[in-house]
Image (spheres, coloured by chain):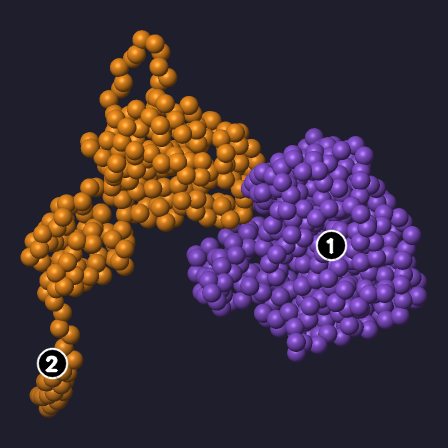
Chain colours: A purple, B orange
Amino acid sequence: MKTFTFTLGGIHPEENKISEHSPVERLEIPGQLFVPITQHLGAPAKVLVNKGDQVKTGQLIARGEAFISANIHAPGTGKVSKIDVHPDQSGYRKTMVVIDVDETEVWEDGIDTGTSIIRSIPYAKEEIIQKIKEMGIVGLGGATFPTHVKLMIPDGKKVETLIINGVECEPYLTSDHRVMLERAEEMLVGVQILMKGLGVNRAVIGIEKNKPDAIAHLSTMAAGFPGIEVAPLMVKYPQGAEKQLIKSILNREVPSGKLPLDVGCVVSNAGTALAVYEAVQKNKPLIERVVTVTGKNVKHPCNLLVRVGTPIQALIDKAGGLPENSGKVISGGPMMGKALNTLEAPVTKGTSGILVMQQGESLRKEVQNCIRCAKCTQVCPMGLEPYLLAQEAKLEKWDMAEADKVMDCIECGSCLYTCPSGRPLLDYIRVGKSKVGNIIRTRKN
Amino acid sequence: MTNIIVPAVVSLGSIGLGAAVILYFVAQKFKVIEDPRIDEVEENLPGANCGGCGYAGCRAFAETLVKGADQGDISALNCPAGGNETMANVAKILGMVAEAKDPQIAVLRCSGSRANAPQKVRYDGPQTCQFAHALSSGESGCPNGCLGLGDCVVTCLFDAMYMDEETGLPVIIEDKCVACGACVKACPRVIIELRDKGKKSKRIYVSCMNTEKGALSRKNCTVSCIGCGKCVKVCPHDAITMENNIAYIDDVKCKLCRKCVPECPTAAILELNFPPRKEKTEGEPTPAEA
């Protein structure tokens, strides 16, 4: 079998896919749900409910009014006990709708909760985009970019390929892997819907070779879906990044500052395709997602189907509680995830995994001087010079950082992983990126 | 020997003379006429180049002062490092009168020491406040409190600050602080403020910047302002305002009567350099220590 990968940089971290073989289990809805009103990239949604209101599962509770924003729906049935601040995954308190959950679940009218698979797609392009927008679908890979915005192709741009990201290159995480295995048919219908929404005839599902069962299963299933093919890829981090995946599959390079649209493709996550299926065929809004709960010391590493707004504590309890020598709890994978400072924080649409790291492995190396070995430059998949960008951010030389393309950084963390001096390169670059981003935005306005 | 020396001296001498003549005319032609007062003013400035005046160093400030004098107004210009004395000297050179300004001083508006706001999580990224603020929400959980990594201390040109190891908060040395404002700019959480130094250095201020509701802010810190508004009611001079769950004492309106200090239920209002209060018989709450 001929396989491809991207050419520039990349690393091979330990895979540690511990929860690979645990089927997705449903986590019971907790007593209280904390639903943040910003779970997506872009403007916060506007809250539509008031304190004391009774909401049904799937009811619209906050509307995304800006161009880049997304609707938010009630992930459970119950009473809105308050609309107040609560710590989110960053540790800062943000506005959330708090729902006291009732014992019996009542679904909003029109939502099909049955398990039968509907394959025919009787909707036109505009209807599909409208439905995806209504149901608040965002990219489930982690960046949470509203999916309906992705499907609205500006005039003059042409798209011929839809790429489905089933790479899951982050170590430990297995949520997309399980979705591809267990809900392949629904996911493929979702891919067809996305293809129809975009008006393309070809979709490629990229999967790394470390998931042979998923490749085999999807290849067989895809035979029944014209235009959809599966592309096995070599294992290399960060292949799941949009631009690297396009290079791997289509051998096209997205120029600096441009979008995948400019090279004729749109990339969407495997989990998103399933969410699109549920939104369009079943009228079911994005209120739950698969989250991997894992870690070397976790008693029962598992993949859980979790309602948005569930406190992370509940997920860890389900996986056997917090092990004694835990050092860090990370939301996301070990490479790009962020350490949590409270377990009260809720699961959001973008939470792909909860990783509990032991004390020893979570410690950072002692920071030493840069020895100019250029390892970070070698592994950077975007061809940047991380040591230089980090120094520029440290010295607050924002103009120089901008000239050296700090905005191209995808924050994959390969530089930090490979640095023999243990320098916190990514930390510096992240801050540099946000500062330069602000400067660029103010300049535009 | 003379055969060599004489022509050498003559030729080199004439080249030198010729160059001197050219240089003289060039210097005349491209002469930069500079106001001699600029040098004189600059000599009278502290020479710290701290930027407290808002200009790029003492030379730039001297130029601005001379330009201001030509236009007849230097009232908006002030050298905080030199104070009133320096400004009086400078004004004399320029033939003007400088208004005496109340001296200011930097104050830290946070009392979240290790004891008051215990550490809940550990931040292990780059050890500067700027990065800690951008990458984490702080070790105590307070979104506005001091991060304790000392960006202000590093930036201070006058050695007027140090980190107190015990409390984990920076300390401002009153005698050395010139209120140049460098620390105010360095602090990513904007908890250092320039305030009037006050008579005999007596000052009263709310030592908290937490804008959360009282119950939430108290979860992270025992001495946070909870926005109860008791101080606003008790103030006889209307000097205290309440905005975003946080009280602010206007340093111009405040008459230093100290009525608000015992009123504060969380001891968030600090009084500095006051004589100790007389003990009251009924066991009034003791004022917070400075």
Q: Is residue B159 left or right of residue A391?
A: left
Task: Give the percent coordinates (x, y) of residue A70.
Answer: 66, 55
Q: Is residue B249 visible?
A: yes
At label 2, the amino acid type is Gln
Residue matched to label 1? A135
Label 2: how many residues lie within 10 Å, few (<14), some (14-19) or many (20+)? Answer: few
Please tell me whether residue B177 is drawn above or below residue A176 in the rendered image.
Answer: above
Q: State the SS at label 1.
A: loop
Q: State the SS at label 2.
A: helix
Q: Residue at x 72, y 56 (%)?
A: A134
Q: Chain of mark 1?
A: A
Q: Chain of mark 2?
A: B
Please tell me whether residue A6 is drawn above or below residue B162 in the rendered image.
Answer: below
Viewer-side residue, B89 vs A297: B89
Residue matched to label 2? B28
Q: Residue at x 49, y 31 (%)?
A: B214
